[in-house]
Image (cartoon, rainbow, N blue to C red):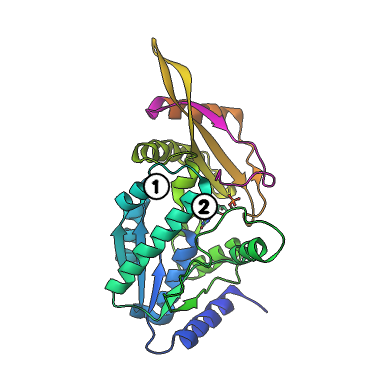
Amino acid sequence: DWTMAGFRAEEIARIRAKVGPEGRVVCGLSGGVDSSVAAVLLHEAIGDRLTCIFVDHGLLRAGEADQVVATFRDRFNIKLVHRDARDLFLGQLSGVTDPEQKRKIIGRLFIEVFEEEQSILGGADFLAQGTLYPDVIESVSATGGPSVTIKSHHNVGGLPEHMRMGLVEPLRELFKDEVRVLGRELGLPEEIVGRHPFPGPGMAIRIPGEVTAERVAILQKADLIFLDEIRKAGLYDVIWQAFAVLLPVRTVGVMGDGRSYDFACALRAVTSTDGMTAEVYPFEMAFLTRTSGRIVNEVRGINRVTYDITSKPPGTIEWE
Ligand code: XMP
């Protein structure tokens, strides 16, 4: 019978066989469930021959960069390089509004910075990625069949040819819910294992139009309030993904005695089992009005909140 404990042991054996007794592996760590589980599994298989590289592109949720370092370096004793590349990413995104172009810039910069860091380390024999089964099939159907590419995922097939390294993808056969089971099996804390999925390009694809440091900061505040209310309502674990989107639209509002003219934001929360289809989460109106009230009152720069009620399909989960 197939069990996760069995899978874990087999996968560790497979990693060891592939990497060999001397091989060194680098792994990109994002703080998300997938790369976290991949990193801990690899660490168990090959110990200090694994180095994780965390590229901070400045597009994460508020506080998450510090959390990544605290968890993996301080708690799991995994070798970790933390590269602060926030200015580089924001600089290159300046003036860019096209969604695919944003993804391409972020994907390219991510690889450049990653490569730079791994060459500082003196190179490695293998690159590890937390690719999941749905990533594999979505990208195959996007390139192989008659269907078109809907969105380029920068975590699949992003390896440039001159980076001649073997590829280790220990989660390639798993769906997200199975990755979570494996993470628990490996002793990862619930706050990581149960974390909602977060896209590689981060908040850049949750800010339609131009991404600026100011807009990222505004969005981070609204997003934090939304997730705080979700946790307080005990809904975090029943929702697949929840986040705020900053709309590049200013609308008129009243603020005290005056008039405001600020951004609108959209809230998005869906249920799903694998991210390939999704249903809107049916919040109670009281939850939505409470959250909206907090965002408008506490976040300078936002004066209007909307709730996105689109399912996938025809919508996608992310806005870009
Ligand atoms: P969409 O928006 O296509 O998203 O319905 C489906 C799931 O994939 C995540 N997503 C990404 N994850 N890199 C990632 O690692 C990406 O470029 C990317 N784009 C979307 C999205 O958050 C959702 O869980």
Q: What segment carries the magenta color?
A: 297-320
Q: Residue at x 41, y 70 (%)?
A: 27
| Percent of width and height locating residue 241 | 55, 48
Q: In the rendered structure, which amino acid carries the disc numbered 2?
A: His
- Residue lying farthest top? 257
Please tell me which residue lies in front, 30 or 177: 30
User: Looking at the picture, does residue 137 appear above or below residue 296?
Assistant: below
Q: Is residue 303 visible?
A: yes
- Seen from the viewer's position, the closer of residues 228 and 259 is 259
Q: Residue at x 51, y 70 (%)?
A: 185
User: Dot 1, how many residues are within 10 Å of its Cα: few (below 14), some (14-19), or many (20+)?
Assistant: some
Q: Which residue is mark 1?
A: 93
Residue situated furthest bottom in the rendering: 21
User: Magenta span has 310?
Assistant: yes
Is-magenta flag for residue 246? no
Q: Is residue 187 above or below residue 148?
A: below
Cα separation between marks 2 and 1: 25 Å
Q: Which residue is mark 2?
A: 196
Q: Is mark 1 within 8 Å of ligand 1?
A: no
Magenta: main secondary structure equals loop
Helix, strand or loop at disc 2? loop
Which amino acid, by three-letter code, is at mark 1? Leu
Q: Quadrant of residue 257?
A: top left
Secondary element at tag 1: helix
| Left or right side of 188 for 240 | right
Question: Tag 1 or tag 2, which sits nearer the N-term?
Answer: 1
Where residue 36 sits, quadrant-wise, is: bottom left
Out of 263 and 142, give the one closest to the viewer: 142
